[in-house]
Amino acid sequence: MPEQDGRIEGFLDLDLDRSRRRGAPEAVLCDAKSVEQVAAIAAEYARLHAAGREDLGPVLFTRADRERAAAVLAALPEASHDVGARLLAWPAQPPAPSGGLVIVACAGTSDLPAAREAELTARYLGRPTRLIADIGIAGLHRLQSRLPELREAACVVVAAGMDGALPTVVAGQISAPVVALPTSVGYGVASGGVTAALTMLSACAPGIGVVNIDNGYGAGHLAAQIARWAPTPG
Amino acid sequence: MPEQDGRIEGFLDLDLDRSRRRGAPEAVLCDAKSVEQVAAIAAEYARLHAAGREDLGPVLFTRADRERAAAVLAALPEASHDVGARLLAWPAQPPAPSGGLVIVACAGTSDLPAAREAELTARYLGRPTRLIADIGIAGLHRLQSRLPELREAACVVVAAGMDGALPTVVAGQISAPVVALPTSVGYGVASGGVTAALTMLSACAPGIGVVNIDNGYGAGHLAAQIARWAPTPG
Amino acid sequence: MPEQDGRIEGFLDLDLDRSRRRGAPEAVLCDAKSVEQVAAIAAEYARLHAAGREDLGPVLFTRADRERAAAVLAALPEASHDVGARLLAWPAQPPAPSGGLVIVACAGTSDLPAAREAELTARYLGRPTRLIADIGIAGLHRLQSRLPELREAACVVVAAGMDGALPTVVAGQISAPVVALPTSVGYGVASGGVTAALTMLSACAPGIGVVNIDNGYGAGHLAAQIARWAPTPG
Amino acid sequence: MPEQDGRIEGFLDLDLDRSRRRGAPEAVLCDAKSVEQVAAIAAEYARLHAAGREDLGPVLFTRADRERAAAVLAALPEASHDVGARLLAWPAQPPAPSGGLVIVACAGTSDLPAAREAELTARYLGRPTRLIADIGIAGLHRLQSRLPELREAACVVVAAGMDGALPTVVAGQISAPVVALPTSVGYGVASGGVTAALTMLSACAPGIGVVNIDNGYGAGHLAAQIARWAPTPG
Amino acid sequence: MPEQDGRIEGFLDLDLDRSRRRGAPEAVLCDAKSVEQVAAIAAEYARLHAAGREDLGPVLFTRADRERAAAVLAALPEASHDVGARLLAWPAQPPAPSGGLVIVACAGTSDLPAAREAELTARYLGRPTRLIADIGIAGLHRLQSRLPELREAACVVVAAGMDGALPTVVAGQISAPVVALPTSVGYGVASGGVTAALTMLSACAPGIGVVNIDNGYGAGHLAAQIARWAPTPG
Amino acid sequence: MPEQDGRIEGFLDLDLDRSRRRGAPEAVLCDAKSVEQVAAIAAEYARLHAAGREDLGPVLFTRADRERAAAVLAALPEASHDVGARLLAWPAQPPAPSGGLVIVACAGTSDLPAAREAELTARYLGRPTRLIADIGIAGLHRLQSRLPELREAACVVVAAGMDGALPTVVAGQISAPVVALPTSVGYGVASGGVTAALTMLSACAPGIGVVNIDNGYGAGHLAAQIARWAPTPG
Amino acid sequence: MPEQDGRIEGFLDLDLDRSRRRGAPEAVLCDAKSVEQVAAIAAEYARLHAAGREDLGPVLFTRADRERAAAVLAALPEASHDVGARLLAWPAQPPAPSGGLVIVACAGTSDLPAAREAELTARYLGRPTRLIADIGIAGLHRLQSRLPELREAACVVVAAGMDGALPTVVAGQISAPVVALPTSVGYGVASGGVTAALTMLSACAPGIGVVNIDNGYGAGHLAAQIARWAPTPG
Amino acid sequence: MPEQDGRIEGFLDLDLDRSRRRGAPEAVLCDAKSVEQVAAIAAEYARLHAAGREDLGPVLFTRADRERAAAVLAALPEASHDVGARLLAWPAQPPAPSGGLVIVACAGTSDLPAAREAELTARYLGRPTRLIADIGIAGLHRLQSRLPELREAACVVVAAGMDGALPTVVAGQISAPVVALPTSVGYGVASGGVTAALTMLSACAPGIGVVNIDNGYGAGHLAAQIARWAPTPG
């Protein structure tokens, strides 16, 4: 048993204060942890919940493969699980939406996992969200037909791999901030997503903030913060 | 004389529509242009103004050394000029502040030029702004004594060179979004600012959007967009 | 005196056969040569001309600063000199235009030196040419208003620095091949042009061939070859 | 059922306009997509075809491993499949050849998959094609014995890994444009193909356009565009 | 049989003199060796021990996966084995602790394998040790609550992946030297640990020495040397 | 006048607490600061001293060119100045030496500026020091003749550029910890010092902690901390 | 059947002239070829041999895993096969040794595969050879005890991974040329062998020529050429 | 006065034993040393010579700009000075040539400084030498016309910048070893010479040893060692 809530000496020390301090609870990045470690963390949340703590908010388990997801669900069976986004949320019900609309747009179907992780994160942090897929700049008419929608958003997350040029084009057409989410989709000099990240940092349109490659969680978190004060649509 | 407003065939084509489309007018990046090119652009703005166009908003001339600044001032003598930030604004008067507070914090005195460029940009885009200097993480008490202030902001721009670790620490303590501005301050493996940029993209705290190295203009622009809907302080 | 035409033992060996073999004469890259070396090469061309050789075609001296340009002009006073493009051509008169139209488009005014070098090279290799400036993707309407023109070209050279995204957008809208010319315009992670080159190689639209950073000569040469068989406009 | 042809909301938005706009239909890059995504795309093409659309041209599915190829063939059983090139074409019959000859040459037998992808792409875009294998520069006589053939081409694609030097040598001997196709063949500092790509961009012979590493599709597409206006051989 | 102790011609030559020369015996890095090679080395140590050599001190076998660990244990059954740290020690009993306290602190639970390797190494080199886990800077209060402990150490090893910022923050708060241990924990631009290593080299607080990524052995070895002369706690 | 000691709002905030917290006062890195900024910092120290503060310890001004050194000396005329090390110390008198001997060894005469900066820093932090020059590994006998001396040290700083191999060789011969100081001495792939830094991080001998390239101050600071508890020689 | 010896159209074109031109026959790099391609090449050599060609010399098949080795042995059953070096030679009998001694030295047991490939290559090219293992610079006495042997060689190949410093130390002690062979042995910043390659290129001792990482074949080939004219030992 | 020949404590320690040990005396790399340091080294050689030492052989001062060359000549007025190669030799007279012929070939006139440094070094180490200039592979006939000469050499140094492909082509045509000397000639992705170095390491022809970029001294030294045993031409 932990000596204090969330701390197991020599192993882990959960940041249970984060909700109060930052307005959003800690997330658990699963892929660099062993299955045993993920299971122990989920068990500690279950223990805290059973002990009556009510400030644990929606905890997200990100980048969870099937094995790690199973470990979470074993301890927290009421969690939701989106396989494509590799994301679990506990408890499963997102908060009622408030603040401005977050739109997540992606260049190709291959960018969907990161885009979906971003959308779900923003939703679990309390924003209304929408996903627009496959509007890469090789065929501009697809983007142009979605511009009226994109202009409704308080923040747009744009996910792209390969040349990573979509965020610049989107940012140049709207007044809301853009969160640029490079993905590891690509091959050759684009493999791993570094070229996309460099392109986004070098964007010749202002109004773009870049997150790490494939960091859909970070993109959705930032977008939710940005859209917090904007008027709720509809 | 241009064939249409802002276009000189084979030379330039100003984006005069940007204010309407994006809520902020075009800025002129001076350091990659020849003095003659900067002078011609400033002259075109002067011509448009003389011809009665009233939608030219505050135009910013960024990264201007003394020679290019002189070229701007020759054509637009009523522009303001901040030498440290290498920035000129025309007309000189910023809009009345609206929206949330933008704070620009920097790790060391060497980061001041980029930080000041960010602050002025946000101010010319209409936000109330404040600058907090020299709160690098080698001595945490300096940051901690400023936390109450930082928590008043609707958006915090954090400029840092060397290890670029300050944005992570700040983001971990507040609920507002952080715009991370890597600077080229540093030497050895930190020279040019690439290490700072990588650190910021890799931040283990969420809520951070990164801009290009030394891109104070882009950081201030993004912060102004982010803070737009937040309540005005005081 | 050379032992054979164009060869000075232990110093240089001109490729006088290139016109016959490749359809375009050798060019002299000046910036990595000493002023004395440039002068000696120009003198050898003058000597060959005085000796009656008539197959020397238009020789281009590229990337020539003022000092090297003066050395060329001292030996070949009838050469033309474009200071912005840092290019000299001898003799000064380009061939009568034949083949398809080569358009050189550039993203910003800062890209003009490389763009102009490309245009002049294509013209001295015998193609009709046109230059379209400042149509960067931060304001797409500028590009869109030029699409009818761009669709007349048999080959379009697209020069861009910073994020280097323009060639993808152009290639996605036309049926002619695009030669992508990254420029060293930019700062931070875009400095030196490597990001632009990576973006262009990673372009998600097909139909793009990339040349070295700032290699306006190579871009214009390739475009002239590509447009060779296409119908001459007008 | 899609709300409009080729669009499935939140998932994909096919560029069905590309044939009209660019003269060649969209291709589907398979390796970054899940098997389910590839199957859904193939199914949408089958649906459109069954619904009577006749402008779908030869659609290429590139970089398809066995599993993804099976998914395509399940939906489009009349497609052709080249296992070595990892390419499927639907319908299977290429257009009647027109325009100039496209030759694809490669340095070693290891470069054959990329080379074959390039050749098939050019053929499905309507050009006569030929493949010349294993003429690397470690034994120049092999290249020299093929020069008469290479000089018949309107465009030569040159695929090479390791040092990537073959395109320079070929371009120096012919008057047609060269499309340089770096391959990921190599080890040590050559692994992944980046060295080959850098060498090709740095080629000291002009007349070379470089595509991404292993991008046989892009190389063949560009070559087909380049050879379009040239006289058809024989 | 070896021609001299520890040497098998054409295969290996153990540094049996290291204990005398450096105060700590040789360690065997297992992961770049074949299972057969590891087995042969362990067998040679067993042979030397059986032959009566008494100066072999605690030999460490590092970075040993299960297969290599089994090979060691087959030859040296009395060795200890820590699976998480991938470390075996022979003989199993560490020396009686002397010198100052070595604390190993890590940013996240994912850094535990490297941290544990560092701690065990320092312990087998004779120092008292302690492990503090999961005090990353995204939630500073966790670090701050451990400062009194950290200030007891004669040397602190700080392991961190991702942004690698923890060593700077720790070093800024204590007077003992810090050994910075970057880990390969991370993804995107942080994958492989290079960003963490660069951050640590660029630290704006002095008093930090950096070791290779995931080099827990080297970090523990250096810390044990540093703490050698300090007073033993308690 | 500052609102509190060491703080000038919007400009600087000196870490006057560092001596108490870390045992060594703040140093001022001059080369990224303007001359005016350096002058203002020196003036603030002078003001604090005049106001009677006695805990300012020996302040070091590092990486100071002649212009910045003059600015320091104008405000603090009693400072010492070592031109080769680009270092100023105020007050000029180092503390009486205590703790173990710090030896700074360098591979070539070109490494002397960084080596001398390291030596002076350790001396101003209170250690006895010695400098051994020009013992690069191309001629091992030079190193070997100095081994008895090197074995007297409680810590050895080893400065090297080019291949950066000297620290490994030294560490392999002694029992004290080695601080590896890569220098920017070198050309070609060694230019800037990155190769030396990589070599040092990859050292196959344990017992080495690496600092940033040319960071003589950091190396000397760390060495002084390491040698603190060791017996004073003689 | 090939149209000419060694050429299969569209697939391969063996360099059968190499023995005459270079004094050593072609080698077949297996790892980038499919098993079918390796089998076809071996079959072509078998066919040429059966057809009576006698100038095929010892052909080496390098970097062959078990599957590719089996394909070679199926067609050329009389070939020799060294599993550790991943090398096959056909015919199995090396030429009688002539020229100077080639010594291959390696830093650690992990470098043995590359070292053994180098040794066998030199032997099959006709030189007397010897292998010295495990003399890394962390314990210099091992190298020093082998210096008399090393000084007998006409050329020394030195294989090393990690910091790659051994070739410099060896070259500084002998008068024969050194071929530096970086290996991919290492982890962290040393992984893949790039650091070792950089160190070797930056060596501060002259007399070193570097080959690609893990290129034991190239190292042995070069050493055999270098030692060709030297007196045969003994 | 030095305490022992060649050693000035805390400053330098000449490797006077090198001639005996390696067959060639130490060289002094001037560009990383201050003018004062170069002067002191030259003075020490003058002092040793005046004191009667006769084993100082031809000392080379490399990479010396005009200022450093003047410092050498002031102390050693009888030295020779080649301005283009930035090399001084003392005494001025090279040894009588012995061993095989060293040919230095370069791709372009811009590579002449490095090529000439290599040639002079080989000559001062006692080999007969010849220089062949400007035979880059963009026009192969130039190389082919020089093949008979190149085949006379016992070792060929090949200097090239840009794509660095010449050494591969040369090595593929001759039986002697090739020393590949990358030069920093180039721009864009070729600037600084890294691309040339990578190409040379990746050469698909065996028989090539690579030295550092612009390291003409190292190339000439290695070539002289290689050619030592070969028959002297003529």
Image: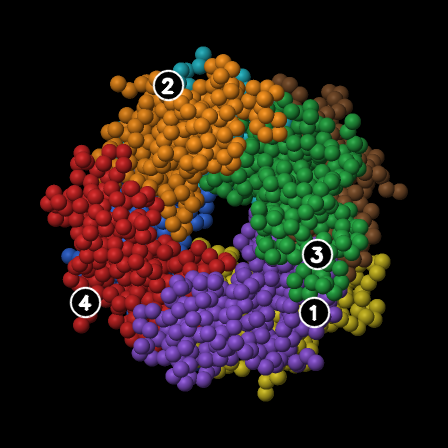
Chain colours: A cyan, B orange, C green, D brown, E blue, F red, G yellow, H purple
| Residue most extreme to the left | F52
| Residue nearest the observer in this picture, C72 or C220 | C72
| Residue nearest the observer in this picture, E184 or D193 | D193
On the image, the x and y values in percent for residue F17 come to: 18, 45
| Residue nearest the observer in this picture, F200 or B46 | B46
Left or right: C200 in relation to B18: right
2 or 4: mark nearer the eye: 2
For disc 2, the chain is B
Q: Circle 1 sits on which residue?
A: H150
Whether pointer 2 and pointer 4 mark residues with C-beta atoms closer than 8 Å, the reply is no
On the image, the x and y values in percent for residue F81 come to: 25, 57
Q: Residue at the spot x=34%, y=59% of the render?
A: F114
Does label 1 lie on the same chain as label 3?
A: no
Q: Which mark is residue F231?
A: 4
SS of the residue at dot 3?
helix
Quadrant of the image occupied by residue G15? bottom right
Q: Residues within 10 Å of mark 2 (few under 14, many from 20)?
A: some
Cα–Cα gap, marks 2 and 4: 67 Å
| Image quarter (top left, top right, bottom left or bottom right) of the C terminus of chain E | bottom left
On the image, the x and y values in percent for residue H88 come to: 50, 70
Q: Residues within 10 Å of mark 1 (few under 14, many from 20)?
A: many
Q: Which mark is residue B95?
A: 2
Name the residue type under label 3: Glu
Cα–Cα gap, marks 2 and 1: 74 Å
Q: Residues within 10 Å of mark 3 (few under 14, many from 20)?
A: many
